[in-house]
Image (tube, rainbow, N blue to C red):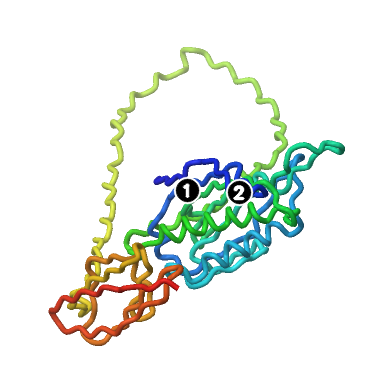
Amino acid sequence: MIRSILCSTVLVLASSTTMVEARGLSVDWSDRAAWNCAHTVAIRTFAIRPNSTRIPSENAATYFASGLSALMTRRSGIEKVFVTQSEEPVEADVILTGTFLDLGVEQRPRGLSFGAPTSICNVSIRAFRSDGMTPVFTVEASREIRLDEGDETGVASMDAVAHEIAQELVHNRHACVASEVRPLQPALTAQTPPIPATAPVVAPTPVAPSPAPAVVPAASIAPAAAVAVAPAVPPTLAPTVTPAAPPVTPVPPQNHAEMGENATTSIESNVPNADVFIDGKFAGNAPIATYMLTPGSHVIEVKAVGFADWSRELNVTRGTATRVVASLVSR
């Protein structure tokens, strides 16, 4: 399991009305390849654990899920992110579930006026594959912020946590390698042990007493003739033959040369980690050292937050190598 951690820190802003008290973010990865290859993400509305010192705002869980969905939609190859309140199975590559460990505005005793109230958002998220069982990653994130005037519901802490989680997950998206995705966990089937049959109770049959044997004089009893008994021959067991398992033919991995993609290109950008799309499909983050292309015309697009999209049409021929350098202009 791989873990990436954003250390906790304390920040004091210039404004006298806003202060970040504490923050923290940690991600434990179980299957990065599954996340890289995910195109559809479902977010189930998170549960809220009761806390006596905080007052969660109404519809806080739905607000947080909707904000997280908007921050990840169409970023780094994620085509669709949607929120669902149902526990029924959904069609998605990755499913996010979670619990707010602490959420809301601090509740102060009546008559206590000193000190500024704060809002906190402390959430634990678990991501699974489409089966809802195979883990992909877990996220622990928290933020406590002093309340601003007009922010009685404390949405600032929820907005900050949603932004940090989305930024971390999008930043960790890379090119999809399907062969590295781990298989789904086998489904657990409950088996009921067989109930043993109860033998019927049979009443004993009364047996009549046997008559007493007649007494014969010893002289009239002839000696019994000796009978020769042949020794028992043990039965011969036929050898058990175990059928051989059918041979398994390995499936050779696909390579670009066999698919006719025999032209190469490298893609660079003046903005590190910019999203690269080739013919409308996400290809990875710049810089890309080598990418195989079929001979012909292709559209190269490079995108980054805060910069205008960059696009060029590239014509490649068989056996050639090209280099593309994208210069993005800030908006």
The foreground one among 264 and 309 is: 309
Q: Callout 2: 10 Å neighbours few (<14), some, many (20+)?
A: many
Q: Which residue is mark 1?
A: 27
Q: Is residue 88 left or right of residue 75?
A: right
- Residue 194 appears anywhere in the view: no
Quadrant of the frame with the C terminus: bottom left
Whole-percent x, y for residue 57 in the image: 75, 54
Whole-percent x, y for residue 49 in the image: 70, 46
Could you say whether the residue bearing mark 2 is in a helix, strand or loop? Answer: strand
Residue displayed at 42% across by 67% down: 76
Could you say whether the residue bearing mark 1 is in a helix, strand or loop? Answer: strand
Quadrant of the frame with the N terminus: top left
Residue at the outermost left position:
319
- Residue 101 appears anywhere in the view: yes
Whole-percent x, y for residue 289 in the image: 23, 65
Seen in the picture, residue 256 relative to 191 is either above or below; the reply is below
Give the quarter of the image for residue 325: bottom left
Q: Which residue is mark 2?
A: 123
The foreground one among 331 and 47 is: 331
